[in-house]
Image: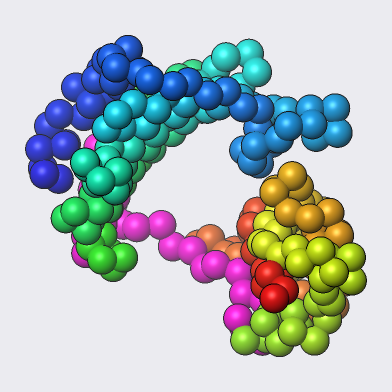
Amino acid sequence: MICFFIRSFTFSIFTLGVVLSLGAQTQEFSYLNKFRYPILDTTKHHPKYYQQSFDNQDSLVAGIYTLDHTIVSKKIVFFDEEKKETLRKVFFYDSLGNVETYREIDSVLDYEFTIGFYPNGIVRSRKVSRSGEEVKAEFFDEMGNPTDPPKGVMPIPYGGKVGWNNYLDKNLEFPLNALYRRKGGTVYIYFHLDKEGNIINPEIMNPEQVYPSLAEEALRVVRDYPHKWTPAQEDGENIPIAMRVPIRFGRPK
């Protein structure tokens, strides 16, 4: 199936419009913030995108657009007769509407295929994973010639993952009003790490999906982090990078 997809990529893009136009049963519309999380209160949380979705009997098609109707991404999800997901196709677009990245996730065959493109349409990379493990990766330059994979190092918090979790265990407090109301959930915090590993401008990504005091506490504990991270690197040089970190509050019983 993977080889077939490479030969039929153009056809897959064409059929996206066909799926949208046939057999649509319900249509939903929602505004999204800059992190692409749904929002209802557009005066408090300014929308940057909107999402349209079409729920068919055996598939779901959803597209994300900027407020001036420029496409950002589209996904097609196919289901079996029991409404279990069998196949997911996701397209990411650049600002000119060209496909930048394509992902295909087959839940039946348990594989994931990702292909990236340069702005000129040349394939940048191809990756195949099975059962969550990468089994093949290829990289190309802008002329289509094979090249070495990019060399990079991801950032690490002080003391690694264990050190980060220990900091949260010691410093994260469960707000009393959320405790009394038995509110829990996961707050996603977005921030930048500079070249020295400092946390810069943390923000709440999903403000309407979590209880307000949980969001405030998650933001506080990230702001109060007293250590630097080991910064990200590319080709041996420190680089700034954007981070997305989950802060989880278990639901009280």
Which secondary structure dominates the residues rendered in magenta? Answer: loop
Percent across and percent down for residue 26 are 44, 21
Q: Which of the image's four quarters has the N terminus?
A: top left
Between 123 and 166, the residue placed more toward the observer is 166
Q: Which residues are magenta?
A: 135-161
Task: Kindly identify the residue that appears in the image at 57 percent across and 23 percent down.
Answer: 29
Residue 118 seen in this snapshot: no
Q: Quadrant of residue 47?
A: top right
Q: Quadrant of residue 31?
A: top right
Would you say residue 157 sits in the magenta stretch? Answer: yes
Q: Quadrant of the C terminus?
A: bottom right
Up-down relation of residue 174 to residue 237 (above or below):
below
Residue drawn at x 81%, y 64% is 181
Residue 160, quarter of picture: bottom right
Q: Is residue 86 above or below residue 151?
A: above
Question: Left of 18 or right of it: where is 152?
Answer: right
Q: Is residue 70 visible?
A: yes
